[in-house]
Image: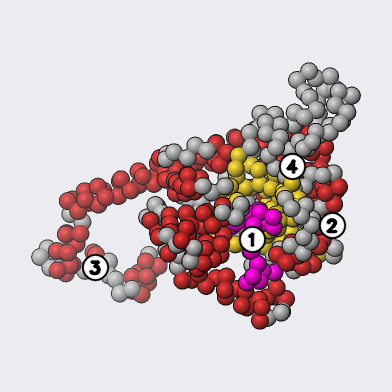
Amino acid sequence: MRGPALIAAAFNIAPRDKRPEAAGLSCSTPFHKSSSVRHSPKSRRLLRCLLYPIVCILIMLGIVQFIAIVCGIVIAFFPSEVDRAVERWQPGSTTSAINLSRWPTDASRGINPVKCHSHNDYWRPVPLFSALKAGCVGVEADVWLFDEELYVGHTTSSLTPKRTLRTLYINPLLRILERQNPLTEFHPQLHRPLQGVFSTDPSQTIILLIDIKTNGYDTYNKVVTQLAPLRERGYLTYFNGTDVVPGPITVVGTGNTPFDLVTANTTYRDIFFDAPLNVLAENDANSGDDDFSSDETRHLTQTQRSTATGATTARDTDNSLTARNVGQGLTGVSQTDTFDRTNSFYASVSFKKSIGFPWTFRLTDQQIDTIRAQIRAAHRRGLKVRYWDVPDWPRLLRNHLWAVLVQEGVDILNVDDLQSAARQDWRPKWSDLWH
């Protein structure tokens, strides 16, 4: 009994049976009055009314999340449609030698090409093949030059010796196109033009977007060298000095790709440029051309109008390495250069920087006008419009933006979710509110 007594003494608390005055306290004292108010039955009922719904909602959310996790684990044990499709693209596929359901060019059977670009394609479960299964006509590879080799990855920390431009893209594309253009006893001569990746549309080209991350001038020359196998077999789209000859693969350089090297050869080139979409519209707005002086071009902001001038001024006055690698659509570009289908393929820009985030979940009239001005500027030059950095969450907003961009004439969607882009069913759904 000494322990409780010591504790009570330490906190200056006396046991109730030794404090007779405590029993004589009136209920009307402030202490008991406030205590009765706080713990009245009415207050407790109100507290229950507030807490019970909150607890129920949290429990329901927890159950839904648990079911989602369990379903995800179960699905992970089954091969996806993408995995099954990749198997048939891979060489040495385990199929019977005598199989009446197979033919030489059947790798892409049942796949319809879709105007989508596989953003950061090297992050896919199987780079290139996952995009082709979904029907995407464009893939993207970020390349880094180290020790005379081109490695593929988002950052230098993600690079590995085996993930190179040749192993992930050039060699697989060679194998696919060799299979799509076979020489057999029934077919002793190649098709002209050569067949592309998709059997359902053999004329559809695959756009290989090479995003140069290291010094553009050194890396570009290495890219040209490594494309030789595709070039020698006639698989590349090229400019012959007078016209563009389409091929199964169209190579486009972006990032630090230098425009002056792309256009150095005036009689032949098989790497095309990714032009700055916002600059094209700004040039049209500043040109005073009546066709492009509408409300659409007048809505271009002053910041957008100064982008090209500021970049080229810095490049012309500074010959340093940094100035020569100023990013997409600006590296190696002078103020007198022009972009057209003989030297460029895409015209691209960041959606968030050029158009802005749709905070009301709908594009404003000014944003729509800017999009239309940019699309018009690219199309009059024969270029394909591509917006990157389009908001992708929530899914309801992303689907709405995709639908608007396609309706306005954007030629290819830059996407991370291949299956949603390929389905092209972007009608609003309740589940899209929180995904």
Name the front one of labels 2 and 4.
4
Q: Which residue is mark 3?
A: 18
Q: Which residue is mark 2?
A: 225
Image vertical order of residue 185 relative to residue 77, above or below? above
Q: Badge 3, how many Cα within 10 Å: few under 14, some, many 20+?
A: few
Residue located 52% across and 38% down the image? 424
Residue located 20% across and 59% down the image? 38
Q: CA distance from mark 2 to mark 4?
A: 19 Å
Marker disc for residue 277: none
Label 3 element class? helix
Label 4 element class? loop
N-term mark: 3 or 4: 3
Q: Which residue is mark 4?
A: 248
N-term mark: 4 or 1: 4
Image vertical order of residue 88 relative to residue 407, above or below? above
Residue located 69% across and 75% down the image? 322
Name the front one of labels 4 and 1.
1
Q: Amino acid at mark 1?
A: Phe
Marker disc for residue 339: 1
Q: CA distance from mark 2 to mark 1?
A: 24 Å
N-term mark: 3 or 2: 3
